[in-house]
Image (spheres, helix red, strand yellow):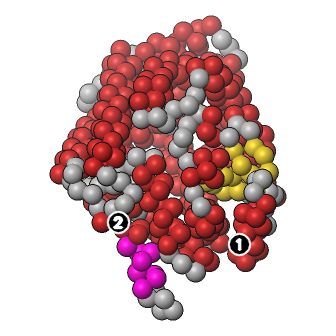
Amino acid sequence: MQFNNIFIIIFLIFLFLSITIKITLDIINYRHRKKNLNKIPEELKGMINEEKLLQINRYSNAKLIYSLVEYFFEKIVLLIILFSGLIPYYYNILNNNFNNIYILILLFFGGFYLIDIIMDIPFSLYFDFVIEKKFNFNKMTFKIWIGDLIKKIILTVIIGSIILIALTFFLYSYEKIWWILLWAFFFSFSMIMQIIYPTIIAPIFNKFKTLENKELKQKIELLLKDSGLKLNGIFEMDASKRSTHSNAYFTGIGKSKRIVLYDSLLKNHTEDEILAILAHEIGHYVKKHVLKNLISTSIVSLLLLFICFYLINNIKLYTGFGFVNNFNINEAKFVGLYLLTILAAPIAFFFSPITSAFSRKHEREADKFSYEKIKSAEPLINSLKKLNVDNLSNIYPADIYSWFYYSHPPLFKRIKYLKSLEKNKGKTK
């Protein structure tokens, strides 16, 4: 690495700042949680005791230590790769042995994906079979875990190969407009994935069956009709064979839209609470949050691809990471894309508060929609309390931490907002 190189200077500055801010936020959040260690909140009295509060704190601490160890390990490995010159060394080996550009690119990205898999395996095992097991969340057998890993690798290789082949074709066939064509491909491919994920990919990992509770199914259908939505089905998923964490979600677009309920959610929540949760999810569709996110993501991705197009022919991008000055950029523009993703990672960290703020705004609107459809705040409030307690979620996040990271408003702020809707019934917020 050339430390006087502008790309390397920018990368190291943003990397150092992102690490510093992350550690600072984690410390602030930890201290805030510790300060409230023995305080049972008024909103949760009768649902939790001091022992449960301590359990929530221990789970939060275990995840914090785990995430920090994983985070620093990844950063150390990344710096070793960069300082050692592994990227140009690996490229030169491939370039000297393979003439086909498609094979070269697949092997280049595949090699670094293999490193990611190898690094992730011990952390994933520890999280699932030590942390999650200790707090009675993990229900997976090692056989299921191995099966999931193999399936994920196969799917990633298939999907990744499709993307890389398209990238190679556009990058080397259309010198001036490859970034626009690649953007159009990404957009189209993401739409296709939205269609095939619920019906083809998700069933590879879990079993889905039509909701058996006919009374609940009828209530959900009435809720959907009242909201003006048509779906392809209401399904129950066997999530409990892997974890006791509970959830519900909407997935798909067009005719592939469907509701999926975790079997653990059906077991632990009343019908009114489930309807309130689903009304919240329906709110995201009715309020066009999915469309808004799609548009914003498309605009950002187009901008990023244009930046890549602008920078990819700059020789300093390559020499900063150890490539020689006579390096043939035209033959290895794909390497430039990979280097730009490395540069972008610490910079993207600073956009977290913006994306989090927009997400929380959407969640607030979905909460309001749920209240308006259910005609009461109580079912959604009760379901949020249960989800928070059952999943051992931190109930005392520091304000600055939740502002920076949280895609959903913290529990007590959501409860306060829902109660305000109840209090101001009939008034427009």
- Looking at the image, residue 247 sits to the left or right of residue 80; the answer is right
- Looking at the image, residue 65 sits to the left or right of residue 142; the answer is left
From the image, state whether disc 1 or disc 2 is nearer to you: 2
* Front residue of this view, candidates 113 and 136: 136
Circle 2 packing at 10 Å, graded few (<14), some (14-19), many (20+), is some
* Dominant SS in magenta: helix
Q: Quadrant of residue 227?
A: bottom right
Q: Is residue 110 visible?
A: no
Examine the rendered structure and indicate whether residue 356 appears above or below residue 92.
Answer: below
Q: Residue at x 68, y 14 (%)?
A: 99
Circle 1 packing at 10 Å, graded few (<14), some (14-19), many (20+), is some
Q: Secondary structure at mark 1?
A: helix
Q: Quadrant of the N terminus?
A: top left
- Residues drawn in magenta: 416-423
Q: Report the disc number at residue 43.
A: 2
Sequence-wise first label, 1 or 2: 2
Residue that protrudes farthest toward the bottom in the picture:
426
Identify residue for label 1.
Answer: 223
Q: Position of residue 160 (x, y in %)?
A: 66, 31
Q: Is residue 20 visible?
A: yes
Examine the rendered structure and indicate whether residue 231 appears above or below residue 111.
Answer: below
Q: Report the disc number at residue 379.
A: none
- Residue 420 is covered by the magenta coloring: yes
Q: Residue at x 81, y 58 (%)?
A: 232
- Residue 335 is covered by the magenta coloring: no
* Front residue of this view, candidates 4 and 216: 216
- Looking at the image, residue 305 sits to the left or right of residue 253; the answer is left
Q: Position of residue 105 (x, y in %)?
A: 63, 23
Q: Residue at x 45, y 81 (%)?
A: 421
Examine the rendered structure and indicate whether residue 250 appears above or below residue 342.
Answer: below
